[in-house]
Image (cartoon, rainbow, N blue to C red):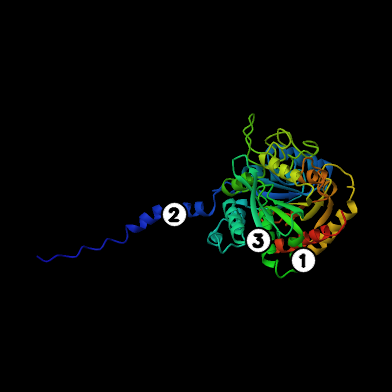
Amino acid sequence: MKLQAAAPAPFLPLRPLLLLLLPLLLQAVAGRSSPYGNRYAGDKVLRVVPENEKAAKTLKILSQQLEVDLWQPGSISYISKGAVTDIRVSRNNSQILLPYLQQANIQYTVLISDLQKAVERHSGLGSSRNRRSLPGYSYEIYHSLEEIQSWMYHLNKTHSDLVHMFCVGKSYEGRPLFVLKLGKRSRLYKKAVWIDCGIHAREWIGPAFCQWFVKEALQTYQSDPAMRRMLNQLYFYIMPIFNVDGYHFSWTQDRFWRKTRSKNSRFRCHGVDANRNWKVKWCEEGASTHPCDDTYCGPFPESEPEVMAVAHFLRKHRKQIKAYLSFHAYAQMLLYPYSYKYATIPNFSCVESAAFNAVNALQSVYGIRYRYGPASSTLYVSSGSSMDWAYKNGIPYAFAFELRDTGHFGFLLPETLIKPTCTETMLAVKNITMHLLKKCH
């Protein structure tokens, strides 16, 4: 009996099957590239500069009623005549807000017309995933919390002569708070510099700079006399991510999350502003008592385990630590105390001189201009900040950097700008450090 070959399966029925599967495939690809889904579809970021007090008052009322996400300034209370105000507004609320602004003759500029597209384009969660793992670690892309902690472990193992990793405590959600101690172990006592990044979760360029600083220090220690002097004569305590819970949340749930992730017993809202939770004029001007606000100061000073852990470490080492540097975004500013009041610090001439030289060094690279000065008059008055706390606790050089940009990208600074931002900032930090090694305190 002759066996007949089976007839080939017809081709055409496959097409309807593909058409059925296509939405699922696209959904899977979209889900893999962005954990946020379509939550920002149609959202806009607007810039308004109120021309008079009436316009400022109107904008305040609208911002409160529509519950906008204020990108700058830090609080609705800071909205005033002439103050640059960047607000993120949902698709539905923009249909209310924009006609109202036009009717009230309040000028506005659309900085980001579709936030969803901007997040997908600039979030660092797309096709570059394959470049994120060790050993080919890229410093020109954003990294998740897990990746940064793996990188810290790796450096601790491979650069034990200059790097020592330790833990200062645990976050609200139980994550370790890791710090890298960087410097040549050549003597028992050395002055030190504290650097932290990522107090506010959505400001991803901060942690990118902390990693860049460590990379530059290790790579140029042998070739750069200034870097060698810095690491030989000083220790650097570097905390790449201060607000670990919030940073993780900004990667997995909400790209624009700012606060910690602690729970409130009376409200559904999560988190405290970790830069309003320090015991220095706590919860006065520039901080909110409402748990749902982005500048919520917390139920009491150092209520957040992250703040308490770092404050404890800084108190313990306050005689050794001579400079405190904290990295934020965005505004292109170099700020020093005071933040909580309009007053001149006792060592103003030394600090002002360091700031002046630092911003000039920064500008020399790409021409990027930074404003500098006391935080209260250069940015706005805010109480309970880490910078003021460090200064009041005896650390003579306390600075807060507001990195790029000035609002075109806002919190979504593209990965292509990590290298130039970090390169210029590196010069500013080296300048401050070299200033510290002189006798001016």
Q: Callout 2, which amino acid?
A: Leu
Up-down relation of residue 413 to residue 345 (above or below): below
The foreground one among 439 and 259 is: 439
Calculate the distance from the C-alpha at mark 2 to the C-alpha at mark 3: 49 Å
Q: Nearer the viewer, mark 1 or mark 3?
A: 3
Q: Residues within 10 Å of mark 2 (few under 14, many from 20)?
A: few
| Mark earlier in primary sequence (2, 3) | 2
Badge 3 density bin: few <14, some 14–19, many ≥20, Cα 10 Å: few
Give the residue at mark 2. 25
Q: Residue furthest top?
A: 266
Task: Kindly tell me whether residue 365 is visible in this rendering.
Answer: yes
Q: Amino acid at mark 3?
A: Asp
Q: Give coordinates of residue 441: x percent, y percent.
A: 87, 53
Residue nearest the viewer, comparing 66 with 374: 374
Q: Amino acid at mark 1?
A: Ala
**In the picture shown, does residue 8 fall above or below 22?**
below
- Horizontal and vertical percent position of residue 432: 80, 58
Q: Which mark is residue 226?
A: 1
* Tag of residue 161: 3
